[in-house]
Image (cartoon, helix red, strand yellow):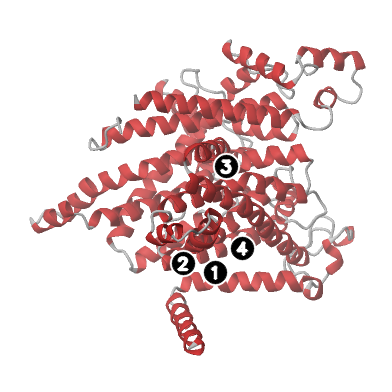
Amino acid sequence: MYILKRLFYMIFVLIGVSILMFTLVRVIPGDPIALALGPHADKEDVERMRREMALDKTLPVQYWYFIQGVKSGRLGMSLIEKRDVMEVIKEKFPATLELVLVAIILSLILAIPLGVTSAIYRGGWWDQINRLIALFGVSFPHFWSGLMFQLIFGSLLALTPLTGRIGGTPPQYITGFFLLDSLITLNWNTFKDCFIHIIGPAIILSLGPLANITRLIRANMIDESSKDYIIVSKATGMSSLIIHYKYMLRNAFSSSLTTIGFLIPLMLGSAFVVEKVFAWPGMARFGADAIIANDFNGVVGVTLVICLAFVGINLVIDILHEVLDPRIKLKK
Amino acid sequence: MNETKSLKMREGLVRNWLRFSKNYLAMAGLFFLILIAVLAILAPWIAPYPNDAKLGVNFQKALLPPSKDHIFGTDEAGRDIFSRLLFGARISLMLAVIVLGIAFSIGVPLGIIAGYYGGAVDQIIMRITDVFSSIPALVMAMAVCVLLKPSLENSMIAIALVWWRSFCRLAYGETLHLKQEEYVTVSRSLGASSFYIMFREILPNMTSSLLVKVTLDAGYAILVGTSISYLGAGASPPTPEWGIMVAEGRHYLPESWWASLFPGLAIFLTVLSFNLLGDGLRDFFDVKVE
């Protein structure tokens, strides 16, 4: 019953966003078609394309066509890519997802020990340093930290390439994640190639989440530390390592999950900037280009994917909560 | 009678200030913000090359490295970067004030009304808020800004039109909790109007949460604003906007690093100051605001 309610809510938000964005991009003054075809375009061509994209119809009719298209897996023609937006997204989404996943893994690897030790030494100098790191992390403009990363590690130290996703030929297509595909095919050189390309944008993208997750784990660990089971465990003389990392962290992490999940759609937004700076051939860069170029179908398509990620992750988190913490019943 | 009351209040203020001023990080943030604000206000008088904030092109002086004459160097058109940064501070602070001002006046009343009345009103307002909340602020603000035609003013309006949702959610959550308080029940039974209860009883009691939110969001709004300009959907050259300055300077990396380093550093320091102060206020008031 609860799941059904959540699903209904998901569909509501998706329809709401599609209507909002659909209307928004179509009331743009000026003529996106004429703009896309260039100044020397034939007047008849412009007219024909406008008819093909149903721009001569009223908004509700256009939306009806759009929904019909979505049902058969089409999102409309992209003006900058000159093919269906669904095709573009299918091709570019794995690159963005790979980047976001590597970034979130990076931030978790660092944030968990930082958050736990911060909570243990709460109020001490280590905690203060961590607080400062966290505040630094959320204060960087991504475009600038990206450029500075390129300046230092790309130009000065020549450790990483400046831009792009891969230098040589891409690995055989299995999952679309280059790192994973090169691992599966045991292609070490390609793996190394992909790794040094992804590490820069992933680090830049992970700074914000790293800060957020550290603070969150710290706060939740402190909440846990005053609970009865911890006091009893301590009284029995159980090793503090086991108490902290096995029992407290498990509960603290479970209550942090909701926020961590919310970070992913947020990162998809930040990826708009990071992918532009690092010329990462992903969906977010396409989204940014689409917005600037008035590619209305592209804008609606990309925002819908982000929104789908947002509501989908919410649902997954609700289910995960129950797995991690059986006290929460989904029926509630 | 009144005198002792005001004396007590002053005493309380002093005590609170002493308690707050022990937080060195927050004080550093506050100090920096005051400094930036003063520099921004005095920009026309203290900038060494005030004309460089506009189109003042001087190609003979293009891309000079930092020196005594130009402490942060010059940009590709020979303009003094330090002077332009001072004028840029006005733009960034103005952006924060305008965005948060509009977002606050839309979001907070909506959130209080939704939380106070509940039922259908709650459902309608909060479901619309949900729809707005499911797209990252940067993405939607960029789209709205392009729709309005890219410019500095429109980028401010666009961000504000996206930002109200988070104020709405905060005010909604606080109202749900505050309307259970006894003083609200008492007011109601004494015949106070709903309007009075919402804006005279409930609103003042969320001041500390809102204050923390405004401080933290000011930095975040500046990040979004400069990002929009950087991507080419906001302010356009030759505006001395910090995001634009980084975008222009990046073409001359790595040789002329100063052209993009210093404007970015200005953004970073300003945002960091807001975050330091906001984090300190959050600890001080002991409120949970994200």
Q: Quadrant of residue B44?
A: bottom right
Label 2 or label 4, whichever comes before in sequence order: 4
Q: Calculate the distance from the C-alpha at mark 2 to the C-alpha at mark 4.
A: 16 Å
| N-terminal label among 2 and 1 | 1
Precedes in sequence: disc 4 or disc 1? 1
Residue B29 tag number? 1
User: Going 75% across and 16% down the picture, which residue do you hit?
Assistant: A53
Q: Do the residues indicated by labels 2 and 4 lie within the same chain of the protein? A: yes
Residue receiving disc 4: B270
Across and down, in percent, residue B119 comes to 47, 38
Respond whether the residues carrying marks 1 and 3 are from the same subunit: no
Q: Amino acid at mark 1?
A: Gly
- Badge 3 marks a residue whose secondary structure is helix
The residue that label 3 is drawn on is: A270
The amino acid pointed to by label 2 is Gly
Which chain is disc 4 placed on? Answer: B
Mark seen at residue B280: 2
Q: Mark 4 touching mark 1, by CB under 8 A?
A: no
